[in-house]
Image (cartoon, grey):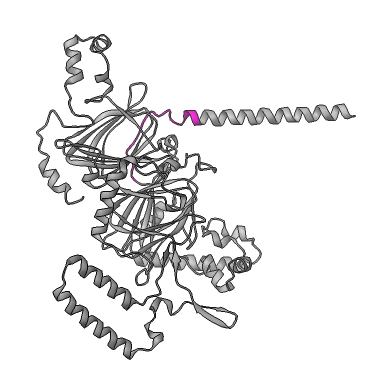
Amino acid sequence: MAKPIALAFSLCLLVLFQSCLAAHQQFQSSQQNECQLDQLQAREPDNRIETEAGRIESWDYNQDDFQCAGVAVQRITIERNGLHLPSYSHAPQLTYIVQGNGFLSTVFPGCPETFEESEQSDEEQGQQQWQGQQGRHGQQGRGQQEQEEYEQQGRGQRGQQGPGQQSRHRQQGRHSQQGQESFEQLDRHQKVQRIREGDVIAIPAGVTYWSYNDGDQPLVAVNLLDIGNQQNQLDRNPRRFYLAGNPQDEFNQHGQSQSRRGQQGQSQWDQDQQQQRERSRHQQQQGGRSRHQQQEGNNKNIFSGFSTQLLADALNIDQQTAQQLQGQNDNRPQIVRVKGRLDFVQPAESEQEERQQQGIQRQQGQGRNGFEETFCNFRIKENIGRPSRADVFSPQAGRISTLNSFKLPILRHLDLSAERGFFYNNAIYSPHWNLNAHEVYYVIRGSARVQVVNNNGQAILDNEVRQGQLFIVPQNHAVLHKASNNGFEYIAFKTQDNAKINTLAGRTSVLRALPDVVLANAYQIDRQQARTLKYNRQETVALSSSRSPRSHRNWLDIAEMFV
């Protein structure tokens, strides 16, 4: 009796093993065939979500070229006074600020809140800042007179006000009961950083971040999620986990219909919110349905999945506040409009201090190895948009700025890097291939003709790419750019923290490194032709066009408006 049971059990194990092996081989085969690409395209965003203070656009990550690179890409636009709610992702992110300025903050787990409110009054802080500015500008004569008037006015105001009225207005509503005593709690939070056009921002997997636009123009950012990264232990479907609001699916194709509705104006958005509120009330009336069924097909923030009572107990708050966290009566999606202005703790900005800090970074940048940085004070951003940050520059062709883990050590943990290109009219980016990375290009301004060639010598991309489009160049595929008459600007994300290229033209090309006799026999040319092939280009990467006039000065004048 025991033998038949053991035999049957062995057969079951054998069948299970064969099934798992077959599934694993099929998965490996599908992964190996993901980059068997016969055609590439320059793509516009496929999905668009309109919010009350901005929009989120995304490209279809199910396309073959995105699956090959293992990435998902978004373009996020935050209108003036808009707040992109706190969220995190299961994959490392690299963000480039295309336009505008604002604030961004990351929350590293276990790290202290290093930004703290002062116990000084607004009047005292303003007086100190005023004194510092007068000292920096050297205005001693008129400054002393104005300072005396300021102090007299301040003493008059303090004489008219009671002690309780001199405290900061932000602190007046911050009272919590502890037994029978009340106390005021000063605000503390982790570092908030100013972000500007040209900044590259690195955000590790699982790290929460939020951003806010305090400028006069829309804040536009291109965001790459490296879903093929080893830090992503889930599948290759991009996910974003929100801590607030009722977010919509940022990568689902049904967002195209949301885009058309959103373009009709704010009144249409209000109508959509009314419909959502009616659906929410209808779901609440269906008492027999489970919580999972109620939430199915309706994205919410992560707090909404918890029991209201358990959440209130965990955070030591009342149930009404817990319901606010769950967004039960809040139908706003990912980007919301702030009432008034965000008032958080931040140091006073000083252009002089910033210039000094930049000078120190330039002096020490070559010796930076990352050991001086701890987990809690990682630098997460670097500006590569300024002309002074160029690594390659040609007065006839343009400039290229690179950002890798040597310049921004946190990129070593993300295994990502970036490149910013700025080419004058008709300039050429030397034909090259990436040795160890896929490359995702986003066109910031201008246009260019781009050709990408695979291992069979076939041009799988031969199109003009223009502003707002995105295209992908797989690893080791050769690529050639030629800027149009209005120039070409791009940001490229690379899936390796120290990505390297090998060029086919220019002073550092692979052809230049080969003996002329090898070139002569390989291409059936004489040795003089081989030497001309090797030494005809003296530039390195940014090449001037040999068939067009070098009228780049006009583009230079235009370019200075953007840098």
Name the magenta segment's main secondary structure. Answer: loop
Q: Is residue 197 visible?
A: no
- Image position of 519 with respect to 96: above or below: above
- Image position of 515 with respect to 54: above or below: above
Q: Which residues are magenta?
A: 31-44
- Image position of 475 with respect to 244: above or below: above
Looking at the image, the residue that sits furthest to the right is 1
Quadrant of the rendering where the N terminus is positioned: top right
**Residue 324 relative to residue 6: left or right:** left
Horizontal and vertical percent for residue 517? Answer: 24, 9
Q: Looking at this view, is 348 or 286 the one in front?
A: 348
**Residue 555, quarter of the rendered image:** top left
**Residue 531 relative to residue 86: left or right:** left
**Residue 421, quarter of the rendered image:** top left
How many numbered marks are there? 0
Whether residue 32 appears in magenta in the rendering, the answer is yes
- Identify which residue is drawn at 34% across, 42% down: 407
**Residue 21 relative to residue 269: left or right:** right
